[in-house]
Amino acid sequence: MFKSLLKLSRPIHLLFAALTYTLGAGIAHYLGQPVRAASFGLGLLAVLALLGGAFLFAEYFRLPRMPLLQGETPRQSEHFRVTLLQVSYAALTLSTVAILTLLLTHSLNLSADILLGLAFLFLVAYAVPPMHLSDTGYGELILAITLGTLLPALALLLQYGQLHRLLPFTTFPLTLLALAYQLVCNFPAFATDQKLGRHTLLTRLTWQRAVPIHHFLVLAAFLLFAAEPFLKYPLGLVWPVFLALPFAAIQMIWLQRIANGGRTLWNFLTALASATFGLTAYLLALTFWIR
């Protein structure tokens, strides 16, 4: 049961959330603001617990005809769903405690309050009925914005106290890569989603439109990174992201090969997408922290 709960909490997404949150704190560090370890840790705990709880709530509210465990009996299903709900509430409680601690220690400002509230509303809309956007085809957009934009912005506000022009230059291309990653994650389960009537971004777009949109998102992200030095974004901050470009190129080539009737190898494709987004976020965060 523990392994099933861990899988449903989407640890790779939680890792990406930690990376992009660390990126936001890295921008504050680059701007000369000493990073406060306590507020950094509490903020990270709050967002990871909130995100993990949202993922578990989303699974709890899945359509009844969609089993949570392979080969489960009705009794096992009911027992697991109760456990899932309990763990979801525990994660939400942990996030609330972390946020209250930030409030009591005066670590939050008005902008951070608004952004944290926005992240909470986004994730509630993602996971909980009546909106339950995770099953409407718009949940991927919510996750991409949360991972690529909201979490870095929140970390920057916690440490620096205000937003900075470096943030949109960094997070907008990253959000495009996050959306491309979410789209790739839909491909392996496409046939099952259609059979069970589950709506995802891919089922709404269809294969024919999703593949060129995926390519556009990846190319646009790296073209934006390439153009940023001309907009007075320091070259030393942006050039490391192009170390992830070979993974992005292979990712696009491999998806196009599958679309043309080649071997699927979904695990390889999702690993490429994870490497493209994760390595880009890591390189950006590392660059800001070491400069």
Image (cartoon, rainbow, N blue to C red):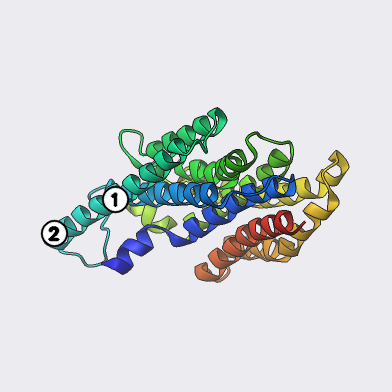
The foreground one among 8 and 209 is 8
Badge 1 marks a residue whose secondary structure is: helix
User: Which amino acid, by three-letter code, is at mark 1?
Assistant: Ala
Looking at the rendered image, the quarter that the C terminus falls into is bottom right
Q: Please tell me which of labels 2 and 1 falls first in the chain.
A: 2
**Crowding at label 1, few (<14), some or many (≥20) Cα neighbours within 10 Å?**
some
Question: Which residue sits furthest right?
Answer: 230
Task: Give percent across and percent down for residue 265.
Answer: 52, 71
Badge 2 marks a residue whose secondary structure is: helix
**Residue drawn 56% across and 30% down?**
111
Say above or below: 126 vs 64.
Answer: above
Give the CA distance from mark 2 to mark 1: 24 Å
Question: Which residue sits furthest left?
Answer: 75
Residue tagged 2: 74
Residue tagged 1: 90
The foreground one among 173 and 188 is 173
Say above or below: 268 vs 83.
Answer: below
Tell me the number on the disc at residue 261: none
Q: Quadrant of residue 269?
A: bottom right
